[in-house]
Image (cartoon, rainbow, N blue to C red):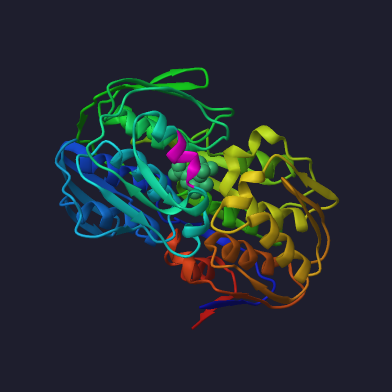
Amino acid sequence: MKFIVQNGGSLKGSIRVPGDKSISHRSIMFGSIAEGTSHISGFLEGEDSLNTLRAFRAMGVDIEGPDNGKVVVHGVGMHGLKKPGQALDVGNSGTSMRLLAGLFSGLPFDVELKGDASLSKRPMARVTRPLAEMGAVVETAAEGRPPLKISGGRQLHGMDYVMPMASAQVKSCCLLAGLYAEGRTCVTEPAPTRDHTERMLTAFGVPVEVKGSTMCVQGPAKLNACDIDVPADISSSAFFMVGASIAQNSDITLEHVGINPTRTGIIDILKLMGADIELLNQREAGGEPVADIRIRSAQLKGAVIPEHLVPLAIDEFPVIFVAAACAQGETIITGAEELRVKECDRIQVMAEGLQALGVDAQPTADGMVIQGGMIQSGTVHSHDDHRIAMAFSMAALRASGEIEIEDCDNVNTSFPGFVDLAAKAGLAIRSLK
Ligand code: S3P
Protein backbone atom coordinates (compact mmCIF):
# COMPACT_ATOMS: atom_id res chain seq x y z
CA MET A 1 0.00 0.00 0.00
CA LYS A 2 1.17 3.54 -0.70
CA PHE A 3 0.01 6.91 0.59
CA ILE A 4 -0.50 9.89 -1.66
CA VAL A 5 -0.71 13.17 0.21
CA GLN A 6 -1.61 16.46 -1.46
CA ASN A 7 0.31 19.43 -0.19
CA GLY A 8 -1.19 22.12 2.00
CA GLY A 9 -4.19 22.19 4.31
CA SER A 10 -4.49 22.56 8.05
CA LEU A 11 -5.41 20.28 10.98
CA LYS A 12 -8.56 21.14 12.89
CA GLY A 13 -11.13 19.74 15.31
CA SER A 14 -10.95 17.26 18.12
CA ILE A 15 -9.81 13.66 17.61
CA ARG A 16 -8.84 10.63 19.69
CA VAL A 17 -5.96 8.57 18.34
CA PRO A 18 -5.81 4.80 19.12
CA GLY A 19 -4.65 3.34 22.42
CA ASP A 20 -1.11 3.35 23.74
CA LYS A 21 0.92 0.50 22.25
CA SER A 22 3.24 -0.04 25.22
CA ILE A 23 0.38 -0.12 27.72
CA SER A 24 -1.75 -2.37 25.47
CA HIS A 25 1.02 -4.99 25.22
CA ARG A 26 1.55 -5.01 28.96
CA SER A 27 -2.18 -5.21 29.76
CA ILE A 28 -2.44 -8.52 27.86
CA MET A 29 0.80 -9.94 29.27
CA PHE A 30 0.02 -9.11 32.89
CA GLY A 31 -3.69 -9.97 32.60
CA SER A 32 -2.75 -13.39 31.21
CA ILE A 33 -0.44 -14.39 34.08
CA ALA A 34 -2.65 -12.82 36.77
CA GLU A 35 -5.15 -14.67 38.95
CA GLY A 36 -8.67 -13.61 37.98
CA THR A 37 -10.30 -11.65 35.17
CA SER A 38 -8.95 -8.30 33.89
CA HIS A 39 -11.10 -5.90 31.85
CA ILE A 40 -9.20 -3.67 29.44
CA SER A 41 -10.65 -0.65 27.63
CA GLY A 42 -9.02 1.55 25.00
CA PHE A 43 -6.87 -1.40 23.82
CA LEU A 44 -4.88 -0.72 20.64
CA GLU A 45 -6.25 -2.99 17.91
CA GLY A 46 -3.04 -2.67 15.90
CA GLU A 47 -1.03 -5.59 14.57
CA ASP A 48 1.72 -5.32 17.22
CA SER A 49 -0.49 -5.57 20.29
CA LEU A 50 -2.75 -8.10 18.51
CA ASN A 51 0.34 -10.27 18.05
CA THR A 52 0.89 -10.23 21.81
CA LEU A 53 -2.77 -11.13 22.31
CA ARG A 54 -2.53 -14.02 19.81
CA ALA A 55 0.62 -15.34 21.53
CA PHE A 56 -1.23 -15.72 24.85
CA ARG A 57 -4.26 -17.25 23.14
CA ALA A 58 -1.89 -19.80 21.59
CA MET A 59 -0.75 -20.59 25.14
CA GLY A 60 -4.26 -21.38 26.29
CA VAL A 61 -5.39 -18.06 27.76
CA ASP A 62 -9.09 -17.31 27.20
CA ILE A 63 -9.21 -13.75 25.86
CA GLU A 64 -12.49 -12.13 24.72
CA GLY A 65 -12.41 -9.35 22.14
CA PRO A 66 -11.07 -6.97 21.13
CA ASP A 67 -14.39 -5.29 20.56
CA ASN A 68 -14.15 -1.53 20.18
CA GLY A 69 -11.06 -1.50 22.37
CA LYS A 70 -12.62 -3.73 25.02
CA VAL A 71 -10.78 -6.93 25.94
CA VAL A 72 -11.49 -9.39 28.74
CA VAL A 73 -8.53 -11.53 29.84
CA HIS A 74 -9.20 -14.59 31.96
CA GLY A 75 -5.86 -14.90 33.69
CA VAL A 76 -4.33 -18.35 34.20
CA GLY A 77 -1.87 -17.39 36.95
CA MET A 78 1.93 -17.53 36.90
CA HIS A 79 2.00 -21.27 36.16
CA GLY A 80 -1.08 -21.74 33.97
CA LEU A 81 0.36 -21.01 30.50
CA LYS A 82 0.43 -24.02 28.15
CA LYS A 83 3.10 -24.97 25.62
CA PRO A 84 2.13 -23.48 22.25
CA GLY A 85 1.76 -25.91 19.34
CA GLN A 86 4.23 -23.98 17.18
CA ALA A 87 6.63 -21.02 17.17
CA LEU A 88 4.94 -17.79 18.24
CA ASP A 89 5.09 -15.23 15.42
CA VAL A 90 5.10 -11.68 16.81
CA GLY A 91 5.36 -10.03 13.38
CA ASN A 92 6.95 -6.58 13.48
CA SER A 93 6.81 -6.17 17.24
CA GLY A 94 10.10 -5.72 19.09
CA THR A 95 8.22 -5.05 22.33
CA SER A 96 6.48 -8.44 22.13
CA MET A 97 9.69 -10.29 21.41
CA ARG A 98 11.86 -8.64 24.06
CA LEU A 99 9.31 -8.60 26.87
CA LEU A 100 8.06 -12.12 26.17
CA ALA A 101 11.65 -13.43 26.10
CA GLY A 102 11.86 -12.40 29.77
CA LEU A 103 8.40 -13.58 30.72
CA PHE A 104 8.85 -17.00 29.08
CA SER A 105 12.38 -17.72 30.37
CA GLY A 106 11.06 -19.13 33.65
CA LEU A 107 8.41 -21.46 32.14
CA PRO A 108 8.62 -25.26 32.37
CA PHE A 109 8.48 -25.77 28.55
CA ASP A 110 10.36 -24.55 25.46
CA VAL A 111 9.00 -21.58 23.48
CA GLU A 112 10.19 -20.20 20.14
CA LEU A 113 9.61 -16.54 19.21
CA LYS A 114 9.95 -15.40 15.61
CA GLY A 115 9.16 -12.24 13.67
CA ASP A 116 8.93 -10.62 10.24
CA ALA A 117 11.87 -9.57 8.04
CA SER A 118 12.38 -6.26 9.89
CA LEU A 119 12.25 -7.79 13.39
CA SER A 120 14.53 -10.63 12.26
CA LYS A 121 17.30 -8.05 11.71
CA ARG A 122 17.00 -6.42 15.15
CA PRO A 123 19.44 -7.05 18.02
CA MET A 124 18.29 -9.45 20.73
CA ALA A 125 21.61 -9.96 22.57
CA ARG A 126 20.61 -6.95 24.67
CA VAL A 127 17.99 -9.22 26.28
CA THR A 128 19.56 -12.67 25.96
CA ARG A 129 22.74 -11.51 27.76
CA PRO A 130 21.06 -10.44 31.04
CA LEU A 131 18.66 -13.40 30.82
CA ALA A 132 21.64 -15.78 30.65
CA GLU A 133 22.97 -14.09 33.78
CA MET A 134 19.72 -15.07 35.52
CA GLY A 135 20.14 -18.71 34.46
CA ALA A 136 17.95 -18.67 31.35
CA VAL A 137 18.94 -20.51 28.19
CA VAL A 138 17.96 -18.63 25.04
CA GLU A 139 19.38 -19.52 21.65
CA THR A 140 19.43 -16.92 18.87
CA ALA A 141 20.30 -16.96 15.18
CA ALA A 142 23.68 -15.51 14.07
CA GLU A 143 24.75 -12.22 15.67
CA GLY A 144 22.07 -12.42 18.34
CA ARG A 145 19.17 -12.02 15.90
CA PRO A 146 15.73 -13.67 16.07
CA PRO A 147 14.30 -16.27 16.18
CA LEU A 148 14.70 -16.88 19.91
CA LYS A 149 14.56 -20.43 21.21
CA ILE A 150 13.85 -20.29 24.93
CA SER A 151 14.55 -23.52 26.85
CA GLY A 152 12.07 -24.44 29.54
CA GLY A 153 12.59 -25.82 33.02
CA ARG A 154 15.36 -23.47 34.15
CA GLN A 155 15.21 -22.10 37.68
CA LEU A 156 16.03 -18.40 37.32
CA HIS A 157 17.76 -16.45 40.05
CA GLY A 158 17.67 -12.73 40.75
CA MET A 159 20.50 -10.42 39.70
CA ASP A 160 21.69 -6.83 39.68
CA TYR A 161 21.93 -5.63 36.12
CA VAL A 162 23.31 -2.31 34.92
CA MET A 163 21.89 -1.68 31.45
CA PRO A 164 24.38 -0.46 28.84
CA MET A 165 21.64 1.39 26.90
CA ALA A 166 18.51 3.32 27.90
CA SER A 167 15.86 0.76 26.93
CA ALA A 168 12.48 0.17 28.54
CA GLN A 169 12.25 -3.09 26.63
CA VAL A 170 15.43 -4.46 28.20
CA LYS A 171 14.43 -3.17 31.65
CA SER A 172 10.99 -4.77 31.32
CA CYS A 173 12.42 -8.05 30.03
CA CYS A 174 14.63 -8.38 33.13
CA LEU A 175 11.87 -7.40 35.57
CA LEU A 176 9.43 -9.88 33.98
CA ALA A 177 12.00 -12.68 34.21
CA GLY A 178 12.45 -11.54 37.81
CA LEU A 179 8.79 -12.43 38.52
CA TYR A 180 9.74 -16.11 38.03
CA ALA A 181 13.18 -15.91 39.69
CA GLU A 182 14.27 -16.77 43.22
CA GLY A 183 15.35 -13.60 45.01
CA ARG A 184 15.57 -9.96 43.98
CA THR A 185 16.09 -8.76 40.43
CA CYS A 186 17.33 -5.17 40.13
CA VAL A 187 17.89 -3.20 36.93
CA THR A 188 19.71 0.13 36.75
CA GLU A 189 19.11 2.36 33.74
CA PRO A 190 21.60 4.93 32.39
CA ALA A 191 18.75 7.42 31.76
CA PRO A 192 15.01 7.39 32.56
CA THR A 193 12.91 5.31 30.14
CA ARG A 194 9.18 4.63 30.01
CA ASP A 195 7.97 3.14 33.29
CA HIS A 196 4.70 1.46 32.25
CA THR A 197 5.95 -1.94 33.43
CA GLU A 198 6.70 -0.62 36.91
CA ARG A 199 3.34 1.18 37.16
CA MET A 200 1.28 -1.71 35.84
CA LEU A 201 3.02 -4.38 37.92
CA THR A 202 2.19 -2.29 40.98
CA ALA A 203 -1.46 -2.10 39.84
CA PHE A 204 -1.45 -5.92 39.49
CA GLY A 205 -0.27 -6.20 43.10
CA VAL A 206 3.49 -6.70 42.62
CA PRO A 207 5.50 -4.07 44.48
CA VAL A 208 8.32 -2.53 42.41
CA GLU A 209 10.95 -0.83 44.51
CA VAL A 210 12.31 2.26 42.77
CA LYS A 211 15.48 3.87 44.17
CA GLY A 212 16.83 6.55 41.86
CA SER A 213 17.61 4.83 38.56
CA THR A 214 17.31 1.29 39.97
CA MET A 215 14.12 -0.80 39.91
CA CYS A 216 13.73 -4.09 41.78
CA VAL A 217 11.16 -6.87 41.99
CA GLN A 218 11.11 -9.78 44.41
CA GLY A 219 10.47 -13.22 43.00
CA PRO A 220 8.67 -15.48 42.81
CA ALA A 221 5.73 -13.10 42.43
CA LYS A 222 1.96 -13.41 42.05
CA LEU A 223 -0.26 -11.02 40.07
CA ASN A 224 -3.90 -10.24 40.85
CA ALA A 225 -6.27 -9.26 38.02
CA CYS A 226 -6.74 -5.54 37.46
CA ASP A 227 -8.86 -3.39 35.12
CA ILE A 228 -6.86 -1.18 32.75
CA ASP A 229 -8.03 1.97 30.93
CA VAL A 230 -5.52 2.45 28.11
CA PRO A 231 -5.06 6.15 27.21
CA ALA A 232 -4.53 7.37 23.63
CA ASP A 233 -0.93 6.90 22.50
CA ILE A 234 1.25 10.01 22.79
CA SER A 235 3.47 8.50 20.08
CA SER A 236 0.54 8.41 17.64
CA SER A 237 -0.54 11.88 18.82
CA ALA A 238 2.93 13.19 17.98
CA PHE A 239 2.19 13.15 14.23
CA PHE A 240 -0.73 15.51 14.79
CA MET A 241 1.26 17.69 17.21
CA VAL A 242 3.89 18.28 14.55
CA GLY A 243 1.33 18.46 11.73
CA ALA A 244 -0.71 21.14 13.51
CA SER A 245 2.43 23.08 14.43
CA ILE A 246 3.76 23.25 10.86
CA ALA A 247 0.47 23.73 8.97
CA GLN A 248 -0.97 27.24 8.84
CA ASN A 249 -4.29 27.98 10.59
CA SER A 250 -4.30 24.72 12.51
CA ASP A 251 -6.01 24.28 15.86
CA ILE A 252 -6.50 20.68 16.94
CA THR A 253 -7.29 18.97 20.24
CA LEU A 254 -6.09 15.41 20.89
CA GLU A 255 -8.28 13.73 23.47
CA HIS A 256 -7.35 11.56 26.46
CA VAL A 257 -3.65 11.29 25.65
CA GLY A 258 -1.27 9.53 28.06
CA ILE A 259 1.19 12.11 29.41
CA ASN A 260 3.34 9.86 31.56
CA PRO A 261 6.47 12.00 32.22
CA THR A 262 8.67 9.25 30.76
CA ARG A 263 6.89 9.79 27.41
CA THR A 264 6.48 13.55 27.11
CA GLY A 265 9.84 14.37 25.51
CA ILE A 266 7.95 15.24 22.32
CA ILE A 267 6.09 18.04 24.10
CA ASP A 268 9.30 19.43 25.65
CA ILE A 269 11.15 19.27 22.33
CA LEU A 270 8.37 20.93 20.35
CA LYS A 271 7.98 23.65 23.01
CA LEU A 272 11.73 24.24 22.84
CA MET A 273 11.25 24.77 19.10
CA GLY A 274 8.50 27.32 19.74
CA ALA A 275 5.35 25.17 19.42
CA ASP A 276 2.02 26.31 20.88
CA ILE A 277 0.92 23.34 22.98
CA GLU A 278 -1.53 23.38 25.89
CA LEU A 279 -2.35 20.52 28.25
CA LEU A 280 -6.03 20.64 29.23
CA ASN A 281 -8.07 18.67 31.81
CA GLN A 282 -5.11 16.90 33.33
CA ARG A 283 -6.34 13.83 35.19
CA GLU A 284 -5.42 10.25 36.12
CA ALA A 285 -6.70 7.09 34.35
CA GLY A 286 -5.68 3.56 35.33
CA GLY A 287 -2.50 4.65 37.12
CA GLU A 288 -1.34 6.86 34.23
CA PRO A 289 -1.65 10.66 33.87
CA VAL A 290 -3.74 11.80 30.88
CA ALA A 291 -4.75 15.12 29.32
CA ASP A 292 -6.37 16.62 26.27
CA ILE A 293 -3.68 18.34 24.22
CA ARG A 294 -4.42 21.46 22.15
CA ILE A 295 -1.95 22.42 19.44
CA ARG A 296 -2.06 25.52 17.25
CA SER A 297 0.14 26.57 14.34
CA ALA A 298 3.42 28.19 15.25
CA GLN A 299 6.61 29.27 13.53
CA LEU A 300 9.06 26.65 14.74
CA LYS A 301 12.72 27.49 15.18
CA GLY A 302 15.73 25.18 15.03
CA ALA A 303 17.17 23.87 18.30
CA VAL A 304 19.92 21.78 19.81
CA ILE A 305 17.93 18.89 21.29
CA PRO A 306 19.12 18.12 24.85
CA GLU A 307 20.28 14.49 25.01
CA HIS A 308 18.36 13.73 28.20
CA LEU A 309 15.13 14.21 26.23
CA VAL A 310 16.07 11.58 23.64
CA PRO A 311 14.88 8.42 25.50
CA LEU A 312 11.72 10.31 26.51
CA ALA A 313 10.84 10.86 22.84
CA ILE A 314 12.59 7.88 21.27
CA ASP A 315 9.72 6.86 18.97
CA GLU A 316 8.94 10.43 17.91
CA PHE A 317 12.17 11.27 16.06
CA PRO A 318 10.90 10.53 12.55
CA VAL A 319 8.31 13.28 12.95
CA ILE A 320 10.67 15.51 14.98
CA PHE A 321 12.99 15.45 11.93
CA VAL A 322 10.05 16.69 9.85
CA ALA A 323 9.41 19.48 12.38
CA ALA A 324 13.09 20.43 12.12
CA ALA A 325 12.85 20.55 8.32
CA CYS A 326 10.04 23.11 8.68
CA ALA A 327 11.76 25.18 11.37
CA GLN A 328 13.76 28.37 10.91
CA GLY A 329 17.47 27.58 11.22
CA GLU A 330 19.44 24.54 12.24
CA THR A 331 18.40 21.61 14.43
CA ILE A 332 21.00 19.27 15.90
CA ILE A 333 20.12 15.86 17.30
CA THR A 334 22.78 13.80 19.12
CA GLY A 335 22.77 10.82 21.49
CA ALA A 336 20.09 9.05 19.44
CA GLU A 337 22.06 6.04 18.12
CA GLU A 338 19.21 3.75 19.28
CA LEU A 339 17.26 5.06 16.27
CA ARG A 340 19.50 2.94 14.05
CA VAL A 341 18.08 -0.31 15.51
CA LYS A 342 14.35 0.46 15.44
CA GLU A 343 11.89 -0.96 12.87
CA CYS A 344 14.40 0.37 10.32
CA ASP A 345 17.51 2.54 10.58
CA ARG A 346 15.49 5.67 11.29
CA ILE A 347 18.48 8.02 10.98
CA GLN A 348 19.47 6.81 7.52
CA VAL A 349 15.96 6.34 6.15
CA MET A 350 14.69 9.73 7.37
CA ALA A 351 17.80 11.53 6.11
CA GLU A 352 17.43 9.94 2.66
CA GLY A 353 13.71 10.71 2.54
CA LEU A 354 14.20 14.34 3.58
CA GLN A 355 16.99 14.73 1.01
CA ALA A 356 14.65 13.31 -1.66
CA LEU A 357 12.28 16.15 -0.71
CA GLY A 358 15.03 18.77 -1.10
CA VAL A 359 15.87 19.20 2.60
CA ASP A 360 19.47 19.60 3.79
CA ALA A 361 19.53 16.71 6.30
CA GLN A 362 22.91 15.25 7.23
CA PRO A 363 22.88 11.94 9.12
CA THR A 364 25.51 11.42 11.83
CA ALA A 365 26.42 8.28 13.79
CA ASP A 366 24.03 9.21 16.60
CA GLY A 367 21.61 11.75 15.15
CA MET A 368 21.12 14.31 12.42
CA VAL A 369 21.81 17.93 11.51
CA ILE A 370 18.91 19.52 9.65
CA GLN A 371 18.68 22.95 8.04
CA GLY A 372 15.08 24.14 8.06
CA GLY A 373 13.70 25.33 4.74
CA MET A 374 11.40 24.33 1.92
CA ILE A 375 10.02 20.81 1.52
CA GLN A 376 9.59 19.84 -2.12
CA SER A 377 7.31 17.35 -3.77
CA GLY A 378 8.64 13.81 -4.26
CA THR A 379 8.51 10.09 -3.56
CA VAL A 380 9.90 8.57 -0.36
CA HIS A 381 10.18 5.03 0.98
CA SER A 382 9.03 4.09 4.45
CA HIS A 383 11.11 0.88 4.46
CA ASP A 384 8.07 -0.85 5.97
CA ASP A 385 8.36 1.36 9.06
CA HIS A 386 5.02 2.68 10.33
CA ARG A 387 6.43 5.83 11.91
CA ILE A 388 8.43 6.81 8.81
CA ALA A 389 5.25 6.56 6.71
CA MET A 390 3.22 8.72 9.08
CA ALA A 391 6.00 11.28 9.57
CA PHE A 392 6.30 11.91 5.82
CA SER A 393 2.50 12.14 5.53
CA MET A 394 2.63 15.17 7.83
CA ALA A 395 5.49 16.71 5.83
CA ALA A 396 3.01 17.23 2.97
CA LEU A 397 1.25 19.93 5.02
CA ARG A 398 4.22 22.20 4.28
CA ALA A 399 5.44 20.80 0.95
CA SER A 400 5.38 22.62 -2.38
CA GLY A 401 3.67 19.64 -4.06
CA GLU A 402 2.33 16.13 -3.56
CA ILE A 403 4.28 13.54 -1.53
CA GLU A 404 4.03 9.86 -2.34
CA ILE A 405 5.07 7.37 0.34
CA GLU A 406 5.75 3.72 -0.50
CA ASP A 407 5.37 0.58 1.67
CA CYS A 408 2.79 1.87 4.13
CA ASP A 409 1.07 -1.38 5.19
CA ASN A 410 2.86 -1.42 8.53
CA VAL A 411 1.06 1.72 9.67
CA ASN A 412 -1.45 -0.85 10.93
CA THR A 413 1.06 -2.09 13.52
CA SER A 414 0.51 0.97 15.71
CA PHE A 415 -2.18 3.17 14.11
CA PRO A 416 -5.11 1.36 12.50
CA GLY A 417 -7.38 3.92 10.81
CA PHE A 418 -4.60 6.50 10.36
CA VAL A 419 -5.65 7.51 6.85
CA ASP A 420 -9.29 8.11 7.80
CA LEU A 421 -8.48 9.95 11.02
CA ALA A 422 -5.81 12.12 9.38
CA ALA A 423 -8.21 12.92 6.52
CA LYS A 424 -10.91 13.83 9.04
CA ALA A 425 -8.47 16.22 10.72
CA GLY A 426 -7.68 17.91 7.38
CA LEU A 427 -4.76 16.06 5.75
CA ALA A 428 -5.37 15.46 2.04
CA ILE A 429 -4.28 11.81 2.22
CA ARG A 430 -5.41 8.71 0.37
CA SER A 431 -4.07 5.19 0.24
CA LEU A 432 -3.58 3.11 -2.92
CA LYS A 433 -3.14 -0.67 -3.06
C1 S3P B 1 8.89 0.29 24.15
C2 S3P B 1 10.15 0.80 24.38
C3 S3P B 1 10.94 1.50 23.35
C4 S3P B 1 10.11 1.93 22.15
C5 S3P B 1 9.14 0.88 21.71
C6 S3P B 1 8.21 0.47 22.84
C7 S3P B 1 8.19 -0.40 25.23
O1 S3P B 1 11.97 0.66 22.91
O2 S3P B 1 10.93 2.28 21.07
O3 S3P B 1 8.34 1.35 20.65
O4 S3P B 1 6.96 -0.60 25.14
O5 S3P B 1 8.83 -0.75 26.24
P1 S3P B 1 13.40 0.65 23.67
O6 S3P B 1 13.07 0.44 25.08
O7 S3P B 1 14.19 -0.49 23.13
O8 S3P B 1 14.00 1.99 23.35
Compared across the picture, whether 103 is left or right of 171 comes to: left
Q: Considering only vertical position in the picture, is 176 above or below 150?
A: above
Of the pair 372 and 389, the residue shown nearer to us: 389
User: Who's the residue at 70% across and 59% down the image?
Assistant: 348
Q: Considering only vertical position in the picture, is 61 above or below 373?
A: above
Of the pair 38 and 98, the residue shown nearer to us: 98
User: Who's the residue at 14% across and 41% down the image?
Assistant: 80
Q: Which residues are magenta?
A: 124-129
The furthest residue to the bottom? 433
Image location of residue 383, percent across then percent down:
58, 67
Of the pair 216 and 238, the residue shown nearer to us: 216
Q: Quadrant of residue 182?
A: top left
Image location of residue 116, percent across then percent down:
43, 64
The furthest residue to the top? 211
Compared across the picture, whether 274 is left or right of 277 comes to: right
Compared across the picture, whether 159 is left or right of 316 comes to: left
Image location of residue 243, percent across then percent down:
64, 59
Magenta stretch: includes residue 125: yes
Q: Quadrant of residue 248?
A: bottom right
User: Who's the residue at 51% across and 54% down the image?
Assistant: 236
Q: Quadrant of residue 174?
A: top left
Image location of residue 404, percent across then percent down:
64, 77
Main secondary structure of the magenta stretch: helix
Q: How many marks?
A: 0
